[in-house]
């Protein structure tokens, strides 16, 4: 099969996984009822736009309709967007920093978002405040990294070192916040949020996440050819007509928008941004014109599947970040050993 068609075909992969996720749960729903509810909701939305009255759906209990549209569908949508955002941002970071072992945490995005969420839970524990401060914290983390990198030359190595320093500093501040938090109330809430999960997602959360995802993902699909040039040495890229410093910062900023929006809704969901790009690269190759759509589809499908397992495997829901860690750590070890073997071993 043509690799380009295969890459774009991966964007269809999340749809059957999402449909299965709507069916599966503590209250299983037959596929016919799920389909009927989705079709009626679509008709009702179109009818409202056109000023037409659509009769109520018959044959499906109202509680089932409410469960699908108000609980499962928002969660499914958030899981797909979180997975796509983290995977695309990870693929871009690996190319821009020319390092196959990096992801969003490299630039202080995750630690900044975690610090913002922890402060919100400590001072004003409301969902909209938590998401807003988590998003701003992620942007602040990468902004501090970019400021340090710009001050010392904006080279790839400088940005990586600045990201590591910022991540360590923000993680230490987060530790202070956890230390002063109430151990009977606020501290468990902070800890659970940092473990990652989508149990609290509702319809209102999809609008900011959807807008950020639409901007970031559309940007990368439009400039996917230029991202290829950033994987070259700076003099070569500049010789081909790319303003390397400006493009690198723009790409990093858009990647941060994707990661921060995902973390603000789903907490710290690790490994997706590291492993999914490698899986996509093994299937469709390193060309970003194919890699980005493949990574988006694979990331969305993976997080959808893992989130479904998180809420159905045990009586109590498993934090999504725990599942991704259980899956990601062994895979990362295999990836790292392969990385070493390709370069001649430990020496």
Image: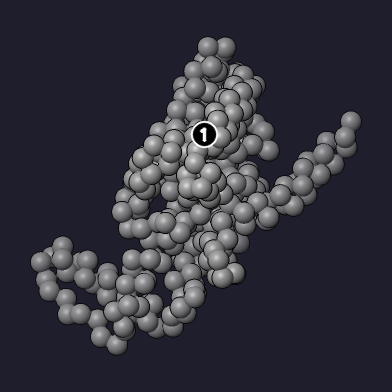
Q: Where does residue 3 sit, x and y in percent of width and height?
A: 59, 55
Q: Where does residue 263 sit, x and y in percent of width and height?
A: 48, 44
Q: Quadrant of the C terminus?
A: top right
Q: Quadrant of the N terminus?
A: bottom right
Q: Residue at x 58, y 25 (%)?
A: 169
In this view, which residue lies farthest toward the left? Answer: 51
Is residue 342 in view?
no
State the SS at label 1.
helix
**Could you classify mark 1 by the number of other residues whose Cα lies within 10 Å: few (under 14), some (14-19), or many (20 or more)?**
few
Q: Quadrant of residue 232?
A: top right
Q: Where does residue 116 sit, x and y in percent of width and height?
A: 45, 35
* Image vertical order of residue 94 relative to residue 316, above or below: above
Q: Nearer the viewer, residue 92 or 120?
A: 120
* Image vertical order of residue 69 relative to residue 7, above or below: below
Total labels drawn: 1
Instruction: Describe residue 70's horizontal placement relative to residue 181 as left or right.
Output: left
Q: Residue at x 38, y 66 (%)?
A: 71
Is residue 155 in view?
yes
Q: Where does residue 65 sit, x and y in percent of width and height?
A: 32, 75
Q: Residue at x 57, y 12 (%)?
A: 152
In this view, which residue lies farthest toward the bottom? Answer: 59
Q: Nearer the viewer, residue 137 or 337?
A: 137
Q: Which residue is mark 1?
A: 180
Q: Residue at x 44, y 35 (%)?
A: 119
Q: Nearer the viewer, residue 206 or 169?
A: 169
């Amino acid at each position: 099969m043509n690799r380009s068609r295969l890459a774009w075909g991966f964007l269809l992969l999340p749809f059957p996984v999402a449909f299965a996720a709507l069916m599966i749960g503590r209250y299983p729903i037959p596929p016919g009822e799920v389909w009927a509810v989705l079709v009626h909701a679509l008709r009702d939305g179109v009818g409202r736009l056109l000023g037409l009255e659509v009769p109520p759906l018959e044959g499906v209990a109202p509680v089932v309709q409410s469960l699908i549209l108000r609980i499962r569908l928002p969660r499914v949508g958030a899981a797909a967007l979180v997975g796509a955002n983290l995977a695309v941002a990870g693929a871009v970071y690996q190319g821009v920093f020319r390092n196959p072992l990096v992801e969003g945490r490299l630039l202080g995005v995750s630690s900044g978002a975690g610090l913002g969420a922890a402060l919100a839970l400590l001072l004003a524990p409301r969902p909209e405040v938590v998401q807003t401060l988590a998003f701003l914290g992620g942007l602040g983390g990468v902004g501090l990294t970019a400021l340090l990198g710009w001050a010392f030359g904006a080279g790839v190595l400088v940005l990586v070192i600045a990201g590591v320093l910022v991540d360590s500093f923000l993680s230490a501040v987060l530790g202070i916040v956890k230390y002063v938090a109430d151990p009977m109330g606020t501290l468990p809430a902070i800890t659970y949020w940092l473990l990652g999960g989508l149990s609290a997602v509702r319809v209102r959360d999809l609008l900011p996440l959807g807008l950020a995802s639409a901007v970031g993902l559309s940007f990368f699909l439009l400039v996917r050819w230029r991202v290829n040039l950033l994987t070259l040495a700076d003099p070569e890229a500049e010789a081909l007509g790319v303003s390397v410093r400006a493009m690198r910062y723009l790409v990093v900023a858009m990647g941060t928008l994707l990661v921060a929006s995902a973390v603000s809704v789903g907490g710290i969901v690790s490994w997706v941004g590291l492993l999914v790009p490698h899986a996509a690269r093994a299937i469709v190759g390193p060309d970003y014109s194919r890699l980005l759509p493949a990574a988006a589809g694979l990331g969305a499908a993976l997080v959808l599947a893992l989130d479904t397992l998180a809420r159905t495997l045990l009586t109590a829901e498993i934090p999504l970040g725990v599942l991704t860690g259980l899956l990601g750590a062994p895979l990362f070890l295999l990836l790292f050993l392969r990385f070493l073997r390709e370069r001649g071993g430990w020496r």
